[in-house]
Image: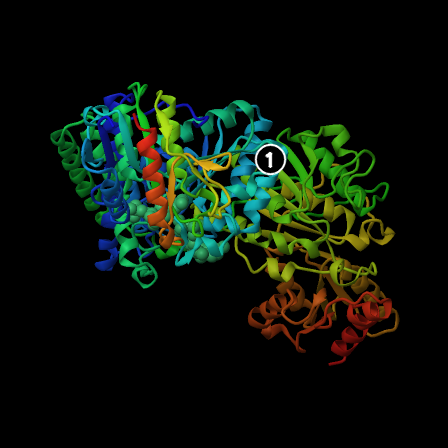
Amino acid sequence: MKDTGIFYSFRSVKTGQQVKKILKLLGSDNVTAVDIDVATGEDFMKFTNYVLAVPTWFDGELPTYWDEFLPSIEDESLKGKNFAIFGGGDQKGYPENFVDGIGLMAEFLEERGGKIVGFTSTDGYTFEGSKAKRGDQFVGLALDIENQAALSNERIDAWVKSLTKEFA
Amino acid sequence: MSDIPKIHSIKKTDKDTLLKWYRLLFLGRTLDEKAPNYLKQAIGWSYHAPAAGHDGIQLAIGQVFDRSKDHLFPYYRDLVTNVSAGLTAEEIIYNGISKDADVAGGGRHMSNHFAKPEWNIHNVSSCTGNHTLHAVGVARAIKTYDSKGVAISSQGESSVSEGYVYEAINGASKEQLPVIFVFQDNGYGISVPKKDQTANRKVAHNFEGFKHLRIMYCNGKDVFDSMNTMLEASKWAEENQKPVIVHANCVRIHSHSNSDRHELYRDDNELGYVKEYDPLAKYKRLLIRYNRATEEELSAIEAEVADEVKVAHRKGMAAPHPTPESAMDYVIPEPYVSTKYPDGTHNHEGESLKLIQGLNETLKAEFRNNPDTYLWGQDIANKDKGGIFNVSKGMQQEFGKKRVFNAPIAEDFIMGTANGMVRFNKNIRVVVEGAEFADYFWPAMEQFVETTHEYWRTKGQFSPNITVRLASGGYIGGGLYHSQNIEAALTTFPGVRVVYPSFADDAAGLLRTSMRSEGMTVFMEPKALYNAPKAATPIPEDFEVPFGKARIRREGSDLSIFTYGNTTHMCLEAAEKLEKEGFGNVEVVDLRSLLPLDNETILASVKKTSRALVVHEDKVFAGFGGEVASLINSEGFEYLDAPVRRVGSTFTPVGFNRTLEAAILPNTDKIFEAAKDLLSY
Ligand SMILES: Cc1cc2nc3c(=O)[nH]c(=O)nc-3n(C[C@H](O)[C@H](O)[C@H](O)COP(=O)(O)O)c2cc1C
Ligand SMILES: Cc1ncc(C[n+]2csc(CCOP(=O)(O)OP(=O)(O)O)c2C)c(N)n1
């Protein structure tokens, strides 16, 4: 597996715990954790494989740290890079915008040539609308600790396994 | 991704603009944070709804608003909107501490209701969201006059629950009007979470089936997303002459207002993250992160703003309060003055016209006289029909559908858009059929009350030049909902004139005066008399009746009857009978105008006859006659030889069955008996 960057906000609590699990499963070789709160475009462009932690906030928005970071790479080409996105969402509290952030991020990356990997089935989730949904899949991994905390570990396990196949 | 062009971004927007925005945002925030100090020191600003957390969308609304062509209706949380639209720190403080120099209206309105009518930043109600109807009304004028610009209305997401907001958006969609409805969504209506307002989390979703309406969603905490969205909204609405909803996600960083304590219903986690999402802090971080400004540059702006606010504060503290005497100013504008008929009487002879003809011909004459006149109502025109009673017959044919048109069955919309449309231009005169029957005016009461406030609240800056026609009263076998008299409820509001003629000539003359006057007049039409031969009279072509001039319809010496509307005719019949049967000579005074009331004529008549009977069709209890009786008691007590008595309806609704109707409503016999009693007292 080529260099892999895992990007998240070091200040986030729930997401931070999920990242820890993912890091463990990925193994630490070639995997670097980067704090999106302070990352530069240069820091971001270094990798071939990416795991991006993108929970959804405020009825379908990206967390502000992502929103503030994205202009750094908006003019870059992301061709040849693989992106796996996961993020928290709450299907009961926000059924109309469940894990929208994952979808918003995927769209941004694809517009710049990035390849999205790590799609997962929407089976087992109940919601009304999601920007992350394509057909019967999410364009990443949805974790709902508000309503389905017990399922998170196995979802993460399966997802990380699939990534090791899809990452270059 | 989104269909909104990315005109602005942290990397693309020029530096001067970025710094100008920072200055506005920081000025807004400084004032927003300073506001509570005035209350703590008991100086004022006792109502303050903080803008913090709404800064992105508010900056954008103010920046996009162009006072040379647009109309802005900000709400009570729109401090930053107003600052961004150009209000100075001084102007914000004058309003906050209610000084006479307040450009919104001299401290008459509640604090934190910023406005500048001179710039088309309208002074709006505290009644949440009711200015949506005004925005639609003025947008109708923008479209009618082929003018440039858009109307922008702003409100919170919770107040969208109000029925009139739906009426406003329905009307804007139907008429395809250039109006932007901004919903600033902070998730709460005071302490009530938005899930208690409507099923969709984003209330704008509720409107997705409305035709011709574009809905845009944006992050109101983000300056760039908000700017791009508002720019597109304004451009699209103007170019396409269609309405837009902008739903902006915001956070409320503080309590709803200074009388709310949000820690009682928001946990620490939430109180923490809403602060973290502060739009101003985000904007500042972006400026620094992308090297668009240095810390020093921003600090210099902050220092400048601090000085500016200090100076404004000093001026605000030194500025005078409104004087107590000024409370009586600007209640209602001066009416049109009749030079030809100063008493509202005439000696014209000729063919008698029915009351309905008098109204129809006066409406037409005034429409010919003033090209800026408009008429709408629920069933005002369709081919040969002109209103349910045919009062407006032939008008749409002669004046066209732009000036005479049907409105949806939404009385508040009818009234509210009248209030809005007349804001466009002082020459505009709107006549509305406020409801098909006066009985159905109640849904419009909210806008009626609002409209009575405008002139006073703006300290004379906005005068709603509207005539509200209402087919009133009973005697047609119409039951509870086609018989009501509602003048008692209307005359309690300062800021309106209320007239209720009983003869064709007075109806024509009062209508002309209403349509030429500034301010609002409610014109009650006794519908039972529209075609009644007894109400028909000759009418001079140019007849005018001034407000506040009663007319003595029958001279007498032994008893005065004060009346109006349907009962005038009954009083005249009773008077004839009383004289014939030798009970006395009765004077009948047709008040014609209830507000203002002709105290002089009333008192002079009582002085002459020493006895007074007040008669009207409405219920005696709490009816308008109580005012007349009370006037006579307090000012004419010495003239009286008998108590003032009243005749009117029983304290019941009006029954449909004819026996019930007759038992309830006054009639000639009941008046005869009461007058006979008084004459022999
Ligand atoms: C204010 C707020 C808004 C949220 N909006 C959404 C949403 O629109 N869609 C969704 O799926 N989850 C939403 N959530 C749920 C979060 O995504 C979820 O709690 C996630 O685990 C947060 O992770 P973090 O605390 O690490 O940022 C929201 C949570 C909060 C507090
Ligand atoms: C017609 C009316 N009903 C109730 C109120 C009392 N009130 C004042 S503000 C408010 C909440 C409005 O919430 P929202 O529209 O979401 O705006 P926000 O204050 O949250 O910005 C209420 C209920 C009012 N002013 N007018």
Q: Quadrant of the N terminus of chain B?
A: top left
> At numbered mark 1, what does the secondary structure look like: helix, strand or loop?
helix
> In the depicted view, which residue is nearer to us: B51 or B463?
B51
Q: Position of residue B245 (x, y in %)?
A: 49, 36
State whether residue B328 appears in this view: no
Q: What count of labels does the image hold?
A: 1
Position of B289 with respect to B589 (left or right) is left
**What residue is drawn where x is 54% and y is 48%?**
B451
Q: State the image quarter where residue B583 is shown.
A: bottom right
**What residue is drawn where x is 73% and y is 72%?**
B650
> In the depicted view, which residue is nearer to us: B70 or A167?
A167
Q: Quadrant of the C terminus of chain B?
A: bottom right
**What residue is drawn where x is 32% and y is 53%?**
B48
Q: Position of residue A120 (x, y in %)?
A: 42, 38
Report which residue position mark 1 lands on: B173
Position of B24 with respect to B646 (left or right) is left
Ligand 2's quadrant: bottom left
Q: Please say if B30 is above or below B366.
A: below
Which residue occupies the extreme left position in the image?
A: B296
Position of B502 with respect to B242 (left or right) is right
